[in-house]
Image (cartoon, helix red, strand yellow):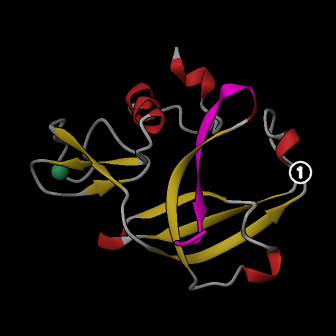
Amino acid sequence: MSFERFGIVSFTSQTKVNEFVDRLYKGKVSGSKCKNCGAAYFPPRADCCGCLSSDMDWFDIAGTGKLISYSTLSYAPTGFEEELPYTTALVRFKNNIQVFGRLSKTIKPEEIAVGMDLVVSSVELSGGRISYEFRKEKG
Ligand SMILES: [Zn+2]
């Protein structure tokens, strides 16, 4: 099951985890969108909580987002100990999609600022696990 290779443990319920992970391996960070009413979700949902439709489609989180908030952690949940310290962040992309994830370590702590532009991309972690992280647009 490919979920075991995905680094973020909280993506368990109400998500199409396997396909989400498969898409990460293809370099795509994806949410789901309701074909019926157009509501968009991240993390992806199998059902729309707006209109209860199960007719969902995938979309990729693309373009540049804005950092809304962040927190640097020196304690990590099981599976992340080797990654310390790291910074978790909430980033708002177009269509008001909010994505929670980690900041790339290529971003220096003194560079981190609310409102900065970030892109999201998939990243391989130690042990062949896959996740995604936020980076600066260039470099
Ligand atoms: Zn809907």
Q: Residue at x 50, y 66 (%)?
A: 119
Q: Nearer the viewer, residue 135 or 39?
A: 135
**Kind of residue indicated by mark 1:** Tyr
> Residue 17: x percent and y percent?
45, 30
The reply, left or right, for residue 14 in relation to residue 48 is right
Location of residue 81 with respect to 107 vertically, above or below: above
Q: Quadrant of the C terminus?
A: bottom right
Disc 1 within 8 angstroms of ligand 1 (CB): no
> Residue 115: x percent and y percent?
56, 85
The reply, left or right, for residue 62 in relation to residue 120 is left
Location of residue 65 with respect to 127 vertically, above or below: below
Q: Which residue is mark 1?
A: 75
- Is 137 covered by the magenta stretch? yes
> Residue 129: x percent and y percent?
65, 30
Q: Exactly how many numbered labels are in the figure?
A: 1
Segment colored magenta: 127-139
